[in-house]
Image (cartoon, helix red, strand yellow):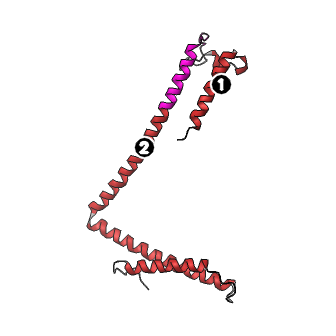
């Protein structure tokens, strides 16, 4: 049996880990209903092999943590190099996410310009100032219920809503 101080290259520890894993799987998958063993004995064996597997896994974790500590103290530039690599991977991931958002923004801008061009092609009533003058004034059709709009504008509004639904349901 290997101890956490076993530093013979980790070979024995790795073999023990593999054996413990196989024993754990074997105890969980073996089916011997006629062997005369009762349920309690099977549960005890499963518990024993699982505990052995966990113990060897902890030993292996301690071994690798010791090696990581040695590397960080003897070669600190390696630790910095790993951190830089992790940061550059994170930056790439975030750049890809930003690009995805920029692409979606461009799609929405195109959708908005298409909608605005469709609105400008039809004669629209004069703009009515809203209660707040901080933003652009809203056309009166936005304030009217759909049923009060003329049939041409109802059709345009339905087309805009369908286009918005298509944009929302597009795969990301």
* First along the sequence among labels 1 and 2: 2
State whether residue 46 is above or below residue 161: below
The range drawn in magenta is 106-128
Magenta stretch secondary structure, dominant = helix
Residue under label 2, please give it: 96
In-image side of 166 versus 109 (left or right): right
Q: Please identify the quarter of the rendering in which residue 97 is found.
A: top left
Instruction: For label 2, count other residues whose C-alpha is less than 10 Å away and answer few (under 14), some (14-19) or many (20+).
Output: few
Q: What element does badge 2 sit on?
A: helix
x 29%, y 67%: residue: 73
In-image side of 90 versus 110 (left or right): left
Give the mark toward the camera: 1 or 2. 1
Residue under label 1, please give it: 158
In front: 55, or 113? Answer: 113
x 43%, y 72%: residue: 61
x 47%, y 38%: residue: 101
The reply to whether dot 1 and dot 2 touch (C-beta < 8 Å) is no
Instruction: For label 1, count other residues whose C-alpha is less than 10 Å away and answer few (under 14), some (14-19) or many (20+).
Output: few
Q: How far across and down, in percent of the image, does residue 143 sit?
A: 66, 19
Estimate the spatial distance between the alpha carbons at disc 1 and disc 2, rounded to whole Å. 34 Å
């Amino acid at each position: 049996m290997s101890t956490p101080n076993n530093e013979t290259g980790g070979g024995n520890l790795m073999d023990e880990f593999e054996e413990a894993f196989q024993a754990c799987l074997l105890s969980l998958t073996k089916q011997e209903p006629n062997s005369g063993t009762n349920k309690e004995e099977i549960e005890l064996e499963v518990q024993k092999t699982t505990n052995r597997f966990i113990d060897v896994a902890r030993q292996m974790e301690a071994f690798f943590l010791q090696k990581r500590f040695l590397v960080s103290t003897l070669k600190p530039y390696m630790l910095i190099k790993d951190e830089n690599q992790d940061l550059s991977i994170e930056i790439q991931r975030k750049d890809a996410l930003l690009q995805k958002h920029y692409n979606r923004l461009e799609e929405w801008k195109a959708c908005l310009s298409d909608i605005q061009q469709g609105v400008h092609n039809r004669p629209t009533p004069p703009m009515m100032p809203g209660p707040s003058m901080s933003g652009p004034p809203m056309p009166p059709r936005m304030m009217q219920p759909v049923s009060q709009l003329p049939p041409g504008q109802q059709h345009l509004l339905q087309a805009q809503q369908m286009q918005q639904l298509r944009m929302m349901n597009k795969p990301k």
